[in-house]
Image (spheres, rainbow, N blue to C red):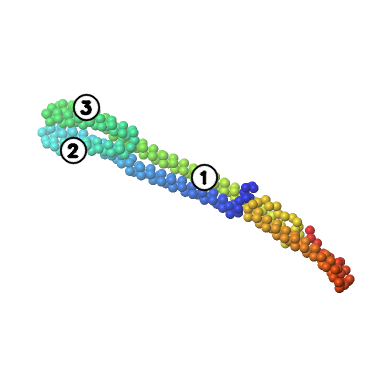
Amino acid sequence: MKRMSSLGLHLQIGLPLTLMAIAIAITCALGVHGIRTLIANAEHSSERLLPAISLALNGDRDLYQALVAQMAYVNARADGRDVSSHQDSFDENSAQALERLQLAADRLDSRQGHQLMRGFKGAFEQWFGTARETMTLADQGRLDDAQTLLRTTSSQQFDTLRNYYDEVGMLADEQASATTTAAIAQGNANNTLALTVTAVALLISGGLSVLFARSILVAVRRLRHRFDDIAEGKGDLTRRIPVERQDDLGKLAVSFNQVLDNLQSMVRSIRSWPNNSVRTLSTCPARSPTMTAAWASRPTPSTR
């Protein structure tokens, strides 16, 4: 309490308000941080994860189109038709399938994605080599061997290859879910922290406001009572207000006590003035005995 009373009135009034202002600033900062986190996570999902999922799906489609072109190539050779369009379709779709999954893995930017991509490249080279061998057998007229290779080894390698597209898509989906979960958790943590800071600031500022207000009111009431005593003419000029504060109210009490000192000194001077006047008149050469006796018997003002 003594430390509180040593603070100036401007600090006693402004400190609770300052605490509330700090709490509001912290709450706003947490809110801005939460919004920025949500924006960053949304940008990460929209710029990297969602395109990665789309690339994986389109790459899987391209891979299937390459398989269709491979089968069409063998069938065209069996029917004696032109195979150049099927060859071009196979080359284009197989290249796009490889490129798109590579782009999808790059957007994931994770160790697991790079590991999947290394395994995919090896599997892709095996499938691509088998597909070329199938078409070469068809070019050589060994259509039965080409069909057998297409149904067995090439088909198995194709299924293995498609699993990589599924895994990359699942990994992108997991990262998107993890990003959303982290953003929600961060938002909840910011909200909890903001509410905690606000509640603590309210309790502290409210407690300080009550303490400061009570301390100020006690000092003001003491001064008011002393002023009332003097105004009613019942005041004891020898009594002083205890100076227990070092703030503006304490300085006011000191000034009030100094005023009482001056008033008490003036009253003493007034009380001593009749006696001094009697002594002065008694020493005058031409004095009147009757006047001197009357002046000496004059009542004097009473003070306490």
The residue depicted at 54 percent of the width and 45 percent of the height is 200
Q: Which residue is mark 3?
A: 153
Say whether disc 2 or disc 3 marks the residue closer to the N-terminus.
2
Please state which of residues 54 and 48 is positioned toward the viewer in this rendering. 48
The residue tagged with tag 3: helix, strand or loop?
helix
Q: Which residue is mark 2?
A: 89
Element type at mark 2:
helix
Q: Where does the C terminus fall, quadrant-wise? A: bottom right
Q: Can residue 65 be seen? A: no
In this rendering, does residue 109 appear at all? yes
Amino acid at pointer 1: Val
Q: CA distance from mark 2 to mark 1?
A: 64 Å
Q: Which residue sits furthest right?
A: 289
Is residue 293 positioned above or below 222 on the image? below
Q: Residues within 10 Å of mark 3 (few under 14, many from 20)?
A: some
Q: Nearer the viewer, residue 230 or 283?
A: 283
Mark 1, residue position = 197
In primary-sequence order, the first of circles 3 and 1 is 3
Residue 267 shown left or right of residue 221 in the figure: right
* C-alpha gap between disc 3 and disc 1: 66 Å
* Residue in view at x 80 percent, y 65 percent: 273
